[in-house]
Amino acid sequence: MPDTRYARGPYRGAALPATLAPNRPQAMAGSGRSRRAMLTDKPTSFDIAQRAGVSQPTVSRALRGDPTVSEATRKRIEAIAAQLNYKVDKNASSLRSRHTNTLALLFFEDPTPDDSLINPFFLSMLGSIARTCALRGYDLLTSFQQLSSNWHVDYEDSHKADGIILLGYGDYETYRARLEQLEAQGTHFVRWGSVQTGQPGTTIGCDNVRGGRDASAHLIGLGCRRIAFLGQVSSHSPELADRYRGACSAMLEAGIDPDPALQADAITTEASGYEAAIELLRRGVAFDAVFAGSDLIAIGAMRAFEEAGLDVPSDVSIVGFDDIPAASLSHPPLTTIAQDYAKAGAALVDTLLRQIRAQSVEAAMLPPRLVVRRSTAPRA
Amino acid sequence: MPDTRYARGPYRGAALPATLAPNRPQAMAGSGRSRRAMLTDKPTSFDIAQRAGVSQPTVSRALRGDPTVSEATRKRIEAIAAQLNYKVDKNASSLRSRHTNTLALLFFEDPTPDDSLINPFFLSMLGSIARTCALRGYDLLTSFQQLSSNWHVDYEDSHKADGIILLGYGDYETYRARLEQLEAQGTHFVRWGSVQTGQPGTTIGCDNVRGGRDASAHLIGLGCRRIAFLGQVSSHSPELADRYRGACSAMLEAGIDPDPALQADAITTEASGYEAAIELLRRGVAFDAVFAGSDLIAIGAMRAFEEAGLDVPSDVSIVGFDDIPAASLSHPPLTTIAQDYAKAGAALVDTLLRQIRAQSVEAAMLPPRLVVRRSTAPRA
DNA sequence: CATAATCCTGAATACGTATGTGGCCAACTT
DNA sequence: AAGTTGGCCACATACGTATTCAGGATTATG
């Protein structure tokens, strides 16, 4: 096998024929370019350079605000660029500079690959993330995938994005394996989730323990003593487990012993919340309040209670978590622990950008906020 | 001014010195490349070529399934590429081939640039569009902007995307100007909205007239005779106007004369629906049913009616439009006209792709579907 | 067996930008 | 006035892939 077959470059060291010049010989002295139709061909930095009487590199530098270009030259170039409606070619720019000014958002929800049932909480987050990206001058690539797909490994390798934001619920064991893979690759990424030590990558999340504590404290303050929790508390959904833990600690502080019979598993869907409430009722244990692991669970539970003839809040007070848009539209409007979408999205984007720029990053927990609506009331 | 200053290419036609070869002289015969650290450097098609004993173009062809590459060669190349975890560089690929395999989604909502109040209908659409893009092998760039921004003109010019999907409500006059600008530029785009003749570009939308007719027919079938409409009917929001027109035609067919006093303006928010219902009550005109221009309007109206002591559906039946997730969670669950998100997203993406591929495209209207829940009931 | 058709591959090069380096000129130093 | 500094800019080139063209090898054809 000849060792020159895979050589880079056209001539492999042989002298170049004098009749061949590299790079667009037809554009010599600008004549070739001007023969082309300006209406169909987007202008390039060479076109701008030609009109401005400068070289192409000067155009590139001027448009990016490089201080080595004089003010007068820059102004002139900017004017011509605007006039010709010139836009920097993103692909060429990224190819040369090795960064894309684009972030990727991976949105996964393993148990529910159904279009319409995307958790509203994450959709609100998406809005916030998209807006923050725009403010920072970054584009956002969005993808909805199964957690088990290989989507995440592609994005940096193929230079589509400079970093990845991970958003979603899913089985935490699968999730963790993916995170470790990303970290091993050296991919820049941040995730939204339960903040715990010893996890791969950087996590931004709500202070779920404190949120759970606040929810319980609110109910206890209303005179409730038998507080049920609806939501999975296994290691597969760390957020819900954290919320439960916070709730328990508030109860213990108030001298209430958390009763395992008052906890029923549910995942974050309305249907699952409905089922969990039915299960709770079936057990026949007394309760005067429900802390639901999420708003969707709470809304499902309220439907079950209504069907069972229980009144919210006079028979049972309910607190949710997330403050999704539907929470204020439910009947009655739901008392809940709000997460600040705007801050959360900004924190995710800014942390990722710091990581991309090789600045120090650290996990962060955002404070939740109790929003009292009409699903909770003092005990009679 | 010398006329060679802006010339393309390094030598401006002079004979090339024999000692200089274009393109990576240090990579001659592969030696330069192999000196670099493989762990930090992503492999290129040259690396694959070297290991496979073929040239770089053959690698490029093989990985894109070009039939001129023999099966044996392709298999070998694919194996090596997989082993080295090689990924085609998106920027280089797009730069050379002049297409990006990326679509852009522009999401605007002019009156409400607020993060949290994004219309849930569009968020559901986003999920469907993202999923369809993934199925078609396209990436999706997402942006939330004001309609008045210049976002849309950038995307094709800077070669970030091959086409644009426009989604959102907003003042139709501003909107139309933007559409004309896009068309003049020759940008590939489709929009979701009211399908009308003589509009710039290609529009995909729900058959709003038929939806309005179905909603009214349903109410008439329940014995309602005084049907109010909540929603703007001006040319600024053509969808709502279409829905109203459909409602009126159903009433006329049933021998009912639409009463202008039974129409109150509202935009697509819960708050606006609430206000419109208050306004309707204030007028003191009798009505036995409400057709709301959207689910959010309907939910706001239900809140107003509850506060006014009116029972839904025994005092007044209500029909919404869109079937957003919250519609089934409201109290009572909302009868509404459903739009098929999955089909809508697929239609938008596929129409845009046809346009990009220079195939024939045409506007399309998707059939709506009446979903009866508990906010409507036969008149006593 | 010569010639044509076919198949496969390599050589050469373009895509449009960003950036390291060197050089020219004017404004300064001693 | 000779040397020195910055300020600005042009030159040369790399980034990694896709594509056109031409040619070698193989097979089909007469």
Image (cartoon, coloured by chain):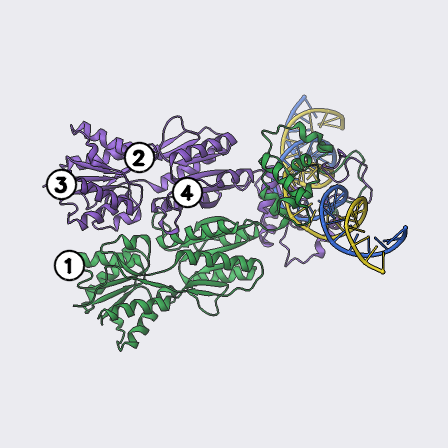
Chain colours: A green, B purple, C yellow, D blue
Q: Is residue B276 above or below residue A287?
A: above
Residues flagged by tags 4 and 3 on a common chain: yes
Label 1, on which residue? A309
Gap between marks 2 and 4, in whole Å?
A: 24 Å
**Which numbered mark, 2 or 4, is in the foreground of this view?**
4
Tell me if label 4 and label 1 are in contact, CB under 8 Å: no
Chain letter of disc 2?
A: B
Image coordinates for residue A120, horizontal then vertical, percent: 35, 52
Chain letter of disc 1?
A: A
Q: Amino acid at mark 1?
A: Gly
Q: What residue is rendered at 45% in x and 62% in y?
A: A204
Circle 4 residues within 10 Å: few <14, some 14–19, many ≥20: many
Label 3, on which residue? B378
Viewer-side residue, B73 vs A279: A279
Label 2, on which residue? B367
Viewer-side residue, B132 vs B78: B132
Q: What residue is rendered at 22% in x and 43% in y?
A: B277
Tell me if label 3 and label 1 are in contact, CB under 8 Å: no
**Which numbered mark, 2 or 3, is in the foreground of this view?**
3
**Which numbered mark, 2 or 1, is in the foreground of this view?**
1
